[in-house]
Image (tube, helix red, strand yellow):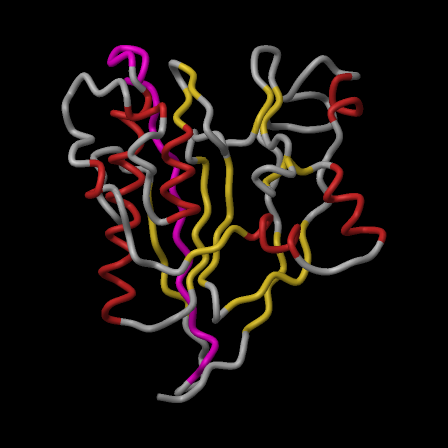
């Protein structure tokens, strides 16, 4: 368990029963707590430190064990340069880029004074988005269908959450570049099909969040 004062983050090392094994890997899951964002009038002051602490915890694990990682969760952060009182785009920027642009609009409101210096909001893990990786490579009908349901500016799905009041992407799956490669991605849903039941959850889909499922394969690793 990685403590970020929310008890909503966990990491688990999965080991092959045969030793030594090149197929051990670490899975880590986060669910960023945004409930105090409205009270602070700044989701970034509440969410970005949570995500940063989570990632720095994974860095410590990586320093002691050079193994592939899968990092996923509901980060309550939308991709791109987007600002809303309850949604923080900066947290996704931190995940995807390893740092946050000091000019990012979400950093403007900082009532607790905990986002400065902005340079501290960074990490060194070589994480890449599974959706983004698949969107950039490969050809074929299935991939083209998926691309049409992705935002071309971020290479993330147009939405993974669909309610009466909000439609957008808050959930992500990342993996370590150079050790894991994306094979396939669960079919993305289209908004028209979901809106027939107004929003999620619905009789067909039991959650307001759409499932993330990705198939990976191990990449050969050079011996040091």
User: Residue at the right extreme?
Assistant: 141
Residue nearest the viewer, comparing 7 with 173: 173
Q: Quadrant of residue 16?
A: bottom left
Badge count: 0
Check the image and report above or below for 91 versus 53. Answer: above
Check the image and report above or below for 224 versus 57. Answer: below
**Quadrant in which the C terminus is drawn:** bottom left
Q: Looking at the image, which residue is at 80% across and 44% down?
A: 145
Q: Looking at the image, which residue is at 57% across and 26% down?
A: 168
> Is residue 28 in the magenta section?
yes
Q: Quadrant of residue 53?
A: top left
Residue nearest the viewer, comparing 23 with 15: 23
* Residue 208 appears in the picture as rendered: no
Q: Which residues are magenta?
A: 21-41
Residue 100, image x, y percentages: 33, 39
Q: Looking at the image, which residue is at 71% across and 39% down?
A: 188
Q: Is residue 8 left or right of residue 219?
A: left
Residue 164, image x, y percentages: 61, 11
Residue 46, image x, y percentages: 27, 26
* Residue 115 appears in the picture as rendered: yes
Residue 186, image x, y percentages: 69, 48
> Is residue 17 in the magenta section?
no
Residue nearest the viewer, comparing 111 with 103: 103
Check the image and report above or below for 67 versus 197. Answer: below
Q: Quadrant of residue 124?
A: bottom left
User: Residue at the front extreme?
Assistant: 103
Q: Is residue 143 left or right of residue 214?
A: right
Q: Is residue 135 left or right of residue 121?
A: right
């Amino acid at each position: 368990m990685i403590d970020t004062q929310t008890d909503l983050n966990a990491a688990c090392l999965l080991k092959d029963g045969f030793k030594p094994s090149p197929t051990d890997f670490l899975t880590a899951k986060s669910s960023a707590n945004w409930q105090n964002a409205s009270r602070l009038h700044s989701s970034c002051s509440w969410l970005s430190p949570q995500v940063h602490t989570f990632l720095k915890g994974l860095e410590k694990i990586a320093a002691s064990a050079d193994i592939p990682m899968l990092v996923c969760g509901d980060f309550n952060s939308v991709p791109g340069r987007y600002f809303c009182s309850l949604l923080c785009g900066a947290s996704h920027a931190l995940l995807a880029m390893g740092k946050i642009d000091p000019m990012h609009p979400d950093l403007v409101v900082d009532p607790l004074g905990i986002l400065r210096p902005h340079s501290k909001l960074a990490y060194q893990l070589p994480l890449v988005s599974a959706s983004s990786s698949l969107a950039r490579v490969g050809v074929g009908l299935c991939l083209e269908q998926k691309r049409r349901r992705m935002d071309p500016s971020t290479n993330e799905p147009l939405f993974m959450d669909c309610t009466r009041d909000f439609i957008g992407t808050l959930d992500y799956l990342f993996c370590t570049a150079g050790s894991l490669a994306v094979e396939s991605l669960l079919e993305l849903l289209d908004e028209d099909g979901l809106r027939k039941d107004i929003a999620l959850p619905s009789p067909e889909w039991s959650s307001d969040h759409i499932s993330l499922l990705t198939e990976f394969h191990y990449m050969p690793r050079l011996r040091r």
